[in-house]
Image: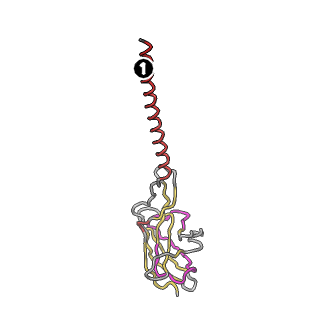
Amino acid sequence: MKLAKIKNNKQGVSELVAYVILIVIAISISLLVYAYLKIILPKSQLECDDGVSVELKDYNCIPTDKVINMTIKNNGLFGVQGLNIRYADKPNSVTSRSFRGVGPDGRPIGENGTFYFLATMQQGVDYNVNLSYASGGKISKLQITPVQFKQDADGKRKEFVLCKNSILTRDIVGCGY
């Protein structure tokens, strides 16, 4: 009689082991899917502070040298670490042309028209920028986008971010031809 009970109990143990193995497999698969999605899904987008703003106070063009001298003021609430300045050579076109060469601090201007300051442009400060537009014949419209250096909440990722909510666009008269 005791032998019969032991044989019957073994069948219950094997079912329990099977359920434990199924649960372990399910948890393993869910961990693999989580790790995969964490790698594949995009991370949160870094954004500029609300209240970032710049103003084009004044500009002066020297058409013979193809140079534009600008006075840009940071009239926002936060510092700016760079500017993205682009221009259009036709009045009703999109600002798609980038300045080339060297920016105001002597550092090269990037392919997309962005240059970075050696020191942060603090709020309320005027900044003189002299740029050459030798690659194009005329400036009809100017677009200035502030750039901030931001890091994510974890402090792992740091990058320059264009402040797309603070884009300044101005029509320009007397630059070129």
Report if residue 137 lies within the magenta region: yes
The span picked out in magenta is 115-143
* Crowd around label 1: few <14 · some 14–19 · many ≥20 (10 Å): few
**Predominant secondary structure, magenta span:** strand
* Residue situated furthest bottom in the rendering: 177
Q: Residue at x 45, y 57 (%)?
A: 45
Q: In the rendered view, would you say 163 is above or below 26?
A: below
Front-most of residues 80 and 41 = 41
The relative height of residue 1 versus residue 46 in the rendered view (above or below) is: above
Residue 80 appears at what percent x and percent y? 48, 64
Counting from the top left corner in percent of width and height, residue 95 is at: 47, 76
Question: In front: 27, or 176?
Answer: 27
Q: Could you tell me which quadrant the N terminus lies in?
A: top left
Q: Residue furthest left?
A: 51
Callout 1: SS: helix
Snapshot colouring: secondary structure
Tell me which residue sits at (52%, 58%) in the image: 159
Q: Position of residue 11 (x, y in %)?
A: 43, 23
132 is higher (above) or lower (below) than 38? below
**Rendered image quadrant of residue 7:** top left
Question: Which kind of residue does numbered mark 1 sit on?
Answer: Asn
Q: Which residue is mark 1?
A: 8
Residue 60 forms part of the magenta stretch: no
* Residue 4 x/y as whole percent: 43, 15
Q: Who is closer to the viewer here, 143 or 74? A: 143
The number of discs equals 1
